[in-house]
Amino acid sequence: MKVLITGGLGFIGTQLSIYLLQRGDEVTIVDHAPKPSPYTPKGVKYVSGDTSIQGSWQEEIPAQNVVINPAGARRVRFLDT
C-alpha cells in the first residue's frame, strides 16, 4: 500500500512510518522542514511543503492509497477551498 503522512516528522508520524515500512508499505512524508530529520526512517520518501497552502506537495496525493493526517485539520489543505 502507498501511504502519505502529513506532518510526518513528529513522534507519531515517525513511529507510524516505522510500522508501515515493516509491513512492506511505501511511505511518503510531507512536512514543512526543508529536509527530513535524523530520526526519519530509511526508505521513506520525503517531500518538503507547507500543507496549509496549495503547493507541489499536493502532486503526491493521487499516487497514494491512503492519506494519514496527524497534522490536524487546520494544517492541511487537500482541495482548493
Image (cartoon, rainbow, N blue to C red):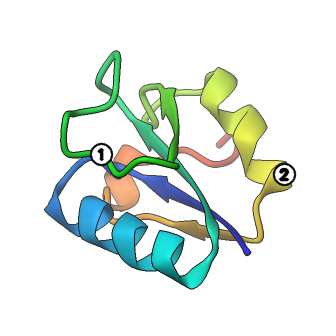
Please name the residue that numbered disc 2 is placed on: 62
The residue nearer to you, when weighing 77 against 8, is 8
- As displayed, is residue 24 above or below residue 10? below
- As displayed, is residue 16 above or below residue 43? below
Q: Is residue 28 left or right of residue 5?
A: right
In the current view of this chain or complex, which residue is farthest to the right? 62
Residue 40: assigned label:
1
Q: Secondary structure at mark 2?
A: helix
Dot placed on the residue nearer the N-terminal end, 1 or 2: 1
Which circle, 1 or 2, is nearer the viewer?
Answer: 1
Q: In percent of the image, x 40 and y 65: which residue is there?
A: 17
Spot occupied by residue 60 in the image (x, y as percentages of width and height): 72, 41
Question: Hey, what amino acid is under mark 2?
Answer: Pro
Location of residue 12 (image quadrant): bottom left
Spot occupied by residue 52 in the image (x, y as percentages of width and height): 43, 35
Q: CA distance from mark 1 to mark 2?
A: 23 Å
In the current view of this chain or complex, which residue is farthest to the top? 34
The residue nearer to you, when weighing 77 against 37, is 37
Residue 66: assigned label:
none
The residue nearer to you, when weighing 27 against 73, is 27
- As displayed, is residue 54 above or below residue 72? above
Q: In percent of the image, x 76 and y 60: which residue is there?
A: 64
Q: In percent of the image, x 48 and y 58: which residue is there?
A: 5
Q: Secondary structure at mark 1?
A: loop
The residue nearer to you, when weighing 53 against 44, is 44
Location of residue 39 (image quadrant): top left
Question: Hey, what amino acid is under mark 1?
Answer: Thr
Q: Is residue 72 left or right of residue 42?
A: left
Spot occupied by residue 20 in the image (x, y as percentages of width and height): 49, 76
